[in-house]
Amino acid sequence: MRRFELRADERGLVELKVTRWKRYGHDRLYANLRDGAVVGWTYAKTGTMRQPMAAH
């Protein structure tokens, strides 16, 4: 699994970039850190959340 360091601001918040992806009948929200590291994604229709798989 890719490891990354989260740096919170003085309020304890981490800035994420959320991008919506709608294709082929799917509707997902991808969350990334400012440096582009993938945090995870969720399926907008079901609310199911996923995290990246561990590297082999």
Image: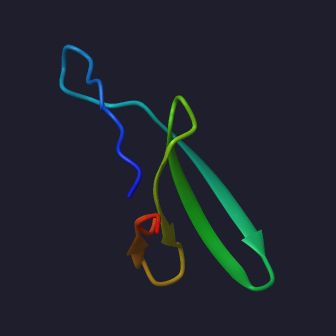
Left of 8 or right of it: where is 52? right
- When asked about the image quadrant of residue 47, the answer is bottom left
Residue 27 lies, in percent from the top left, at 65, 74
Image point (75%, 85%), residue name: 25
* Residue drawn at (70%, 63%) of the image: 21
Residue 10: percent from left, percent from top: 20, 14
Q: Looking at the image, which residue is at 26% across and 24% down?
A: 8
Q: How is the image coloured?
A: rainbow
- Identify which residue, 7 or 55, lies in the foreground: 55
Q: Is residue 18 above or below residue 10?
A: below
Task: Give the residue furthest to the right.
Answer: 24
Residue at the top extreme of this rendering = 10
Residue lying at the far front in this picture: please name it. Answer: 56
Quarter of the rendering occupied by the N terminus: bottom left
Is residue 48 positioned above or below 12 on the image? below
Task: Kindly identify the residue that appears in the image at 26 percent across and 29 percent down.
Answer: 13
